[in-house]
Amino acid sequence: MKCEHLMAEAYPFNHHPCWTDNRQEAWERIHLPIAPRCNVKCAFCDHNATSSCHVPRPGYSSRLMKPREAFERTMALLSDRPNLRIVAVAGPGEPFANNGTLQTMSMIRSERSDLKFCLSTNGVLLADKIDDIVEIGLETVTVSVSTVRPKTAAVIYEWAEIDGTVMRGISMGERIIQRQLKGISEAAEAGIHVKCNTIMIPSLNATEMKEISQHLSEAGASIQNIVPLVPYAGMSHLRRPTRHEIALARQEASEYCRQFTHCRQCRSDVVGIPGNDTVL
């Protein structure tokens, strides 16, 4: 069943480049690389050095910043770039697994109440952080959900640290999916708009796109972003889906969730509009 909040005409973020297809009036955003630690090991990511992924894939960063440095860098850029309106954290690890994430945002919020905040998360800790992100004034969050089947999750994720325990296998997959959907639901109920990134892996989850979209819609997600696998790390031997496969998946999934089609799978250390970035 489709949800009324998914209708395009009701969607409010006409200037957010990671949420709207409008590129003429898009605001700039900054991705601050302040989250080195990750609590989930995706098979297509590499946790070595400062990167949880690759160049120029999501999560890659050539360097890390401490909260004070990120705050000062943001303040300097805001004075030079009047179109910079969005401050985001998208890695290189999991934002909610790093204390510096909310610390940095609190510092920035104390100086600029007009800015929009955004986070990209694997969703495992999202429900635990709802009160914190509401207090800081975060309006949008992106949750990476690439399956709703525990057996598939056991392949996509090599391990996950949940409640202080490192888990693997199908039981891990069940817990991750449960927590992701709970986090999406509670965020939506709190008035936070949720976008979900779904990585399409032809030999693994390609037939699940419509099923995933239905679960995301029922949980309260506003929009879905189906993006291609970029073969790397433990999935370097797999192929990238074709444009036709991505287009077909988006068409099928659109029955339940509005689809975003302008994703550039950005790094976690850039500023500007996706496709026209400057590395910090």
Image (cartoon, grey):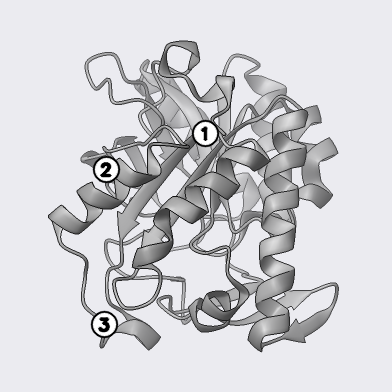
- State the residue position of label 3: 238
Circle 2 packing at 10 Å, graded few (<14), some (14-19), many (20+), is few
Can residue 98 be seen? Answer: no
Q: Quadrant of residue 278?
A: top left
Camera-side residue of 205 and 180: 205
Counting from the top left corner in percent of width and height, residue 202 is at 29, 71
Residue 278's disc number: 2
User: Is the residue under label 2 in contact with that under label 1 (CB below 8 Å)?
Assistant: no
Foreground mark, 1 or 3, reads 3
**Does residue 207 sit above or below 214 in this rendering?**
below
Q: Amino acid at mark 3?
A: Leu
Disc on res. 87: 1
Instruction: Give the image location of residue 67, x and y in percent.
Output: 64, 49
**Which numbered disc, 1 or 3, marks the residue that appears first in the sequence?**
1
Identified at 69% across, 32% down, the residue is 188
Q: Please tell me whether mark 3 sits on a helix, a strand or a loop.
A: loop
Q: Amino acid at mark 2?
A: Thr
1 or 2: mark nearer the eye: 1
Residue 12 lies, in percent from the top left, at: 50, 14
Q: Quadrant of the N terminus?
A: top right
CA distance separating discs 1 and 2: 15 Å
Q: Secondary structure at mark 2?
A: strand
Quarter occupied by residue 124? bottom right
Q: Nearer the viewer, residue 96 or 248?
A: 248
Precedes in sequence: disc 1 or disc 2? 1
